[in-house]
Amino acid sequence: PIYLAVAALRYLSPEQYDAFKGDVDRLIHADQRVELFEYALRWMVLRHLDQHFHPTRPPKILYKDLPSAAEEIVRLLSVLAYGCSDDAVEASRAFSIGVAALGLPSQPLRPREQAGLSTFDQAARRLAQATPQVKKAVVDAAVRMTSIDDHVTVREAELIRALCDSIDCPMPPLLPQS
């Protein structure tokens, strides 16, 4: 459904697109707070439309392996852990599973106040400059985090979709792991 809307919105004039972006931002901020889902939805829609209205060159590869991207990965997985669970113990467990799936040394979950939307945005933008192998590993770890209870909620699936979209990585099928 999002991609159908994006396809239709490509017919806007540049002026209409700029007005649309402003409207999206006003709607998201209308209740004086931005939920992770709202942020992810905005990111997915506007990222594709920005590429259409303001084409840019693909980013240079900055991260060629997991250790070189570890700090950004930890920041991103911390945000996802809190986005998938309101319970601190559950978020920490999910985070540990994600880090272990990547074979990274044990890391502490970042505090909630350091795991906001701006952190997700910065980490995703930087990880968009990773090799496809690093991106795939990050997405696989995120999928493991969201499926630890053998149930992937719509919210969790949308967070994974936003992650994949933001780092330009294909979306995997989201099935419970055995």
Image (spheres, grey):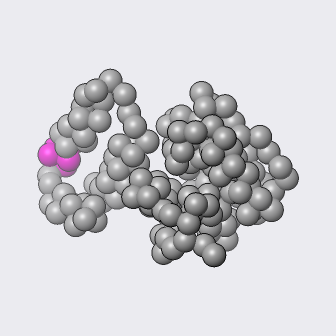
Residue 143 image point, x, y percent: 57, 63
| Residue furthest out toward the top | 32
Image-based side of 10 in relation to 175, left or right: left
Quadrant into which the C terminus falls: bottom right
7 up-or-down from 12: above or below: below
Q: Is residue 17 magenta?
A: yes
Would you say residue 160 is visible in this rendering?
A: yes
Image point (80%, 62%), residue name: 103
Quadrant into which the N terminus falls: bottom left
136 up-or-down from 50: above or below: below
What secondary structure do most residues of the magenta stretch adopt? helix
Query: Which is nearer the eye, 133 or 77?
Result: 77
Image point (37%, 54%), residue name: 44
Image-based side of 158 in relation to 23, left or right: right
111 up-or-down from 59: above or below: above
Query: Which is nearer the eye, 42 or 15?
Result: 42
Residue 128 image point, x, y percent: 57, 57
Q: Is residue 85 magenta?
A: no
Residue 130 image point, x, y percent: 64, 60
Image point (32%, 24%), residue name: 32
Image-based side of 147 in relation to 157, left or right: right
For the record, the magenta segment spans 14-18
Image point (54%, 34%), residue name: 116
User: How many labels were placed on the picture?
Assistant: 0
Image-based side of 49 in relation to 175, left or right: left
Would you say residue 125 is visible in this rendering?
A: no
Quadrant location of residue 11?
bottom left
Residue 38 image point, x, y percent: 35, 43
